[in-house]
Image: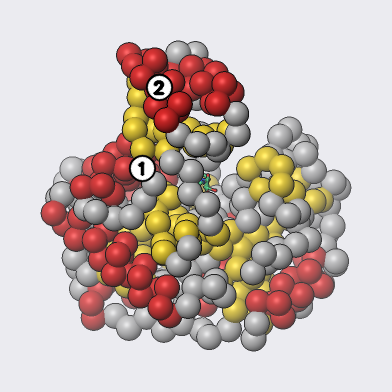
Amino acid sequence: MTILILGSGGREHTFAWKMVQSPLCDKLFVAPGNSGTAEIATNINIKVTDFDAIKTLVLEHNIEMVVVGPEDPLVQGIHDFFLNDTQLKHVAVIGPQKAAAELEGSKEFAKEFLFRHHIPTAAYQSFSVDNVEEGYRFLETLKAPYVLKADGLAAGKGVLILNDLDEAKTELKSMLVDAKFGDASSKVVIEEFLDGIELSCFVLTDGKNYKILPTAKDYKRIGEGDTGLNTGGMGAVSPVPFATEEFLNKIEERIVKPTINGLIKDNLPYKGFVFIGLIKVGDDPKVIEYNVRMGDPETEVVLPRLKTDLVEIFKAISEERLNEIDIEIDDRAATTVMLVSGGYPEAYEKGKEITGLDQVEGSIPFHAGALLKEGKVVTSGGRVMAITSYGNTYQEAIKKSYQNIEKLHFDKMNYRKDIGFDL
Ligand code: AMP
Ligand code: GLY
């Protein structure tokens, strides 16, 4: 079949890498794609939220399946757009419909869902410009640190964790009254702070059945020892060594099952990935957030461990027979280290040539913010490339990634040298 992947990151290169291995994949397009996807598929330069251009592309090439990488098109209703169009409704779209995508599109919606279905999560209240004063009073009842979350999508920047009460009040005002994150902070969720170690769980669902994929842990801060500004993710490890079988059972019973049943009860149509951000508090898992897509760079360690044909899985999801699929996982660990542009996550330069890719041995470089220009691979974003390796242990895998990174170069290249340090 002919397939289209929407997106341009390391996640989408990994999807493409996995899907071209399937005998079911005859032709693969990626929009807009990057230098990595250009090597194995056909890139089409259209935006992931330009639904009309996507429709034209799908009709022109008889595309039968669309795999949606990032959250924006899902929250804007791309799946509904396909279902409501007589020319497109036969196309399999992997990603939830708009109503379900609100689990990522609105923190308040997600919290209400979690409480309605008795899924463990932090206590919270939400506030708008009409009750800022009540927000201050609520903050006074909490202990530091204070967790403030913009309700809507804020490109991963909408969560503030503050140690000082006055600072928390000032930030609350700035979000609600001065629209610090634009429309996204017209509502703010204030949460109880949860102290523990984070991990992520990835679930596939066809809206009725579910399958759990390997766990992963990502490293969000720019600096070693988890310091400095938040990024999209600087590296990842799978599986998560502290997620024992007993702990995984708790995740399935207390979180995954009620989540899938909740989607059914609330009539939220879902065919795709559920990314559950978790925190281990004592011995118990609690939900920090839902995302309605795969994580990046978590995809770069989870999909390499999946032995089952991904196109076959997607086909089963679209036909609501995921229960018929056996998910086979590689026992080896996988790790990835993200190479980023100097300055990221603040201002950085682009267009730097990346050299040494032909020297890489025993690792897979998944391209992210990188493009082909006059036959050369050059940087085009903050997160440039994720170097993934396998190993019998995560330590062995990470060593291989770092050995190969020694061979790679671009001007002002930066990366964290401590991925896995806390495990
Ligand atoms: P989110 O965008 O909801 O994933 O939040 C970003 C990051 O903020 C998470 O990955 C956590 O590190 C942290 N965080 C969010 N909510 C809480 C909470 N209730 N307690 C502690 N840390 C949190
Ligand atoms: N790595 C975190 C995310 O994809 O949201």
Instruction: Report the Cα–Cα distance between label 1 and label 2.
Output: 15 Å
Q: Position of residue 188 (x, y in %)?
A: 40, 28
- Crowd class of label 1 (few under 14; some 14 to 19; many from 20; radius 10 Å): few
Instruction: Give the SS element for disc 2.
Output: helix
> Residue at point 79% right, 51% down?
414
Q: Position of residue 97 (x, y in %)?
A: 26, 47
Going from N to C along the chain, the mark reached first, 1 or 2, is: 1
Q: Is residue 133 left or right of residue 46?
A: left
Instruction: Give the SS element for disc 1.
Output: loop
- Residue kind at label 1, given as amino acid type: Ala
- Residue kind at label 2, given as amino acid type: Arg
> Residue at point 45% right, 26% down?
140
- Crowd class of label 2 (few under 14; some 14 to 19; many from 20; radius 10 Å): few
Cβ at disc 1 under 8 Å from ligand 1: no
State whether residue 137 is above or below residue 83. Answer: above
Which quadrant is home to the C terminus? Answer: bottom right
Residue receiving disc 1: 123
> Residue at point 55% right, 18% down?
170
Q: Is residue 103 left or right of residue 219?
A: left
Residue receiving disc 2: 137
Residue 370 numbered mark, or none: none
Q: Is any atom of residue 238 visible in this view?
A: yes
Q: Nearer the viewer, residue 220 or 95?
A: 220
Q: Is residue 188 left or right of residue 84?
A: right
